[in-house]
Amino acid sequence: MNLKDIYEEVAKCNRCGGCQAVCPTYAETRVEWSVARGRIALVRAMIEGKLPVSPETMAPIYECLLCQKCVVNCPSGVRTDQIMLAAREELMKTQGKPTVAKAAVRVIRDPKRFNAAVTLLGYYTKTLRPVTIVTRLERVARVVAKANGLVPRVEGRSLQSMAPKYLKPVADPAHRVAYFIGCATNRLNHAPGVATIEVLQRNRVAVEVPEAVCCGLPAASYGDRETASEMARRNLDHFADLDVEAVVSDCGSCTSTLSEYGELLADDPVYRDRAKAFSAKVRDISQYLVEIDFARPRGEVKTSVTYHDPCHLCRYLKVTAEPRTVLQSIPGVDFREMKEADACCGAAGSYMLTHPQLSEEILGRKVAHVAETKAEVLATSCPACQLNLSYGLKKQAVPARVVHTVELLAQAYRAEEGVARPAGRDATREAKATRQEVAGSGR
């Protein structure tokens, strides 16, 4: 996309300032270029030749979370997210990939590199991280300190390679789906994925787990549309021959990206029809469960729960009621709505590492709202949000644990069957000995 192609969208901004009331970054900085109106003014100046397209002038553009909070509240309907992405794409074309983007894209586009990176991350969490904490070396760079708090224990193997262990025969299935495993669930925390498979099978859904690569969102967010399109084509090839009614994901960001493949590849004569058909089948796990009228559990989970709406799920996909329907269907759950439940938590993929200070300031506001509810559990539907929220709650000493929405439903089904196993990462640790029995590795 050429930057001049979005001039008409840029010109729709009437500078009313309504975005100031809802922008998470502006709420913390109070700087004009940290709000949609200011960022759009910068892009307009670049298009009109009044400012050069350079890393310096683009810094505020990369500071945008792409949360769409301004978009849904704009009286003129300005698609600020599309403008920001077009500007980032222009920088890629004229200046080349920024260093962080270049490194990230090299890793995500190659499953072997990704697995190698995760393996190294695993070694780091077991060896070097304790050293940096003890020696206080982490104070040298805020990003290192943030990474130390964010990175969980890395799973020894990918969920993709272990999927056959969890896939059980479904007698007389009423539905058939393909489960797309996102990168975080695949290698950082299996619990949401295991729960997703369990819950689907409990509802007479036959589950297939095709090989997959990254959905392409990280590349797209950096403005690398070419790589994002490449990832989309590879996933379409992996899912090509499946006879399923839906493609289900437990990650709001992945779900949103997969649902946009039809738009992303609209100009590709080979893939556009397949991409459009694929995107039409994409569903978030809670969305799909409500659509098939999932079995309400009879097992109790006696706890208080509040819910955080991931940006991609609530604004890009307009999925807000479904996760709450799932949570409120669980006997024993005391659901407590928090203030600004749909406000960004500051994760935004790699944003929590590339902009650690601003991310933490945004996260602090979210954690304060969680604390006000006094809920014992914070549920959400995005693995990246889970990482960031867990970090924030721990740092602010808020006694709540973070789990995926579907984990609580799985826990209720287990309680119904007399199997006492908690939701969350503790559940995956119980399976450590079993995992070690399975040899091999993979995505």
Image (cartoon, rainbow, N blue to C red):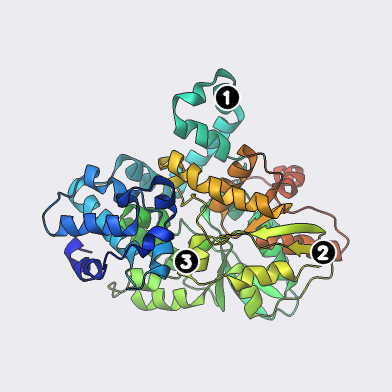
Q: Work out whether residue 336 or residue 254 is closer to the camera in this orientation and state it.
A: 336
Q: Nearer the viewer, mark 3 or mark 2?
A: 2
Q: Amino acid at mark 1?
A: Ile
Which residue does the numbered mark 3 point to in the structure image?
256
Which residue does the numbered mark 2 point to in the structure image?
332
Q: Does residue 56 appear left or right of residue 394 in this picture?
A: left
What residue sits 64% from the left and 52% below the top? 370
Marker disc for residue 133:
1
Q: Amino acid at mark 3?
A: Ser
What residue sits 56% from the left and 57% below the top? 382
Q: Look at the picture and state if 361 lies above or below 267.
A: above
Q: Look at the picture and state if 209 lies above or below 288.
A: above
Q: CA distance from mark 3 to mark 2?
A: 31 Å
Give the class, few, some or many, for how many residues have Cα within 10 Å of label 1's Cα (few <14, many ≥20).
Answer: few
What residue sits 75% from the left and 71% below the top? 329
Q: Work out whether residue 34 or residue 80 is closer to the camera in this orientation and state it.
A: 34
Q: Amino acid at mark 2?
A: Gly
Q: Does residue 298 appear left or right of residue 64 in this picture?
A: right
User: Could you tell me which secondary element the residue under label 1 belongs to?
Assistant: helix
Q: Is residue 401 in view?
A: yes
Looking at marks 1 and 3 on the same chain, the residue that comes earlier in the sequence is marked by 1
Residue 167 in picture, x, y percent from top left: 69, 63
Q: Based on the displayed image, in which of its 4 quarters is residue 305 positioned?
A: bottom right
Are the residues at dot 2 and dot 1 in contact (C-beta closer than 8 Å)? no
Q: Look at the picture and state if 303 lies above or below 364.
A: below
User: Could you tell me which secondary element the residue under label 3 belongs to?
Assistant: helix
- Which residue is at the far left? 49
Are the residues at dot 3 and dot 2 in contact (C-beta closer than 8 Å)? no
Q: Is residue 109 in view?
A: no
Quadrant containing the N terminus in the rendered view:
bottom left
Residue 80 in picture, x, y percent from top left: 33, 63
Looking at marks 2 and 1 on the same chain, the residue that comes earlier in the sequence is marked by 1
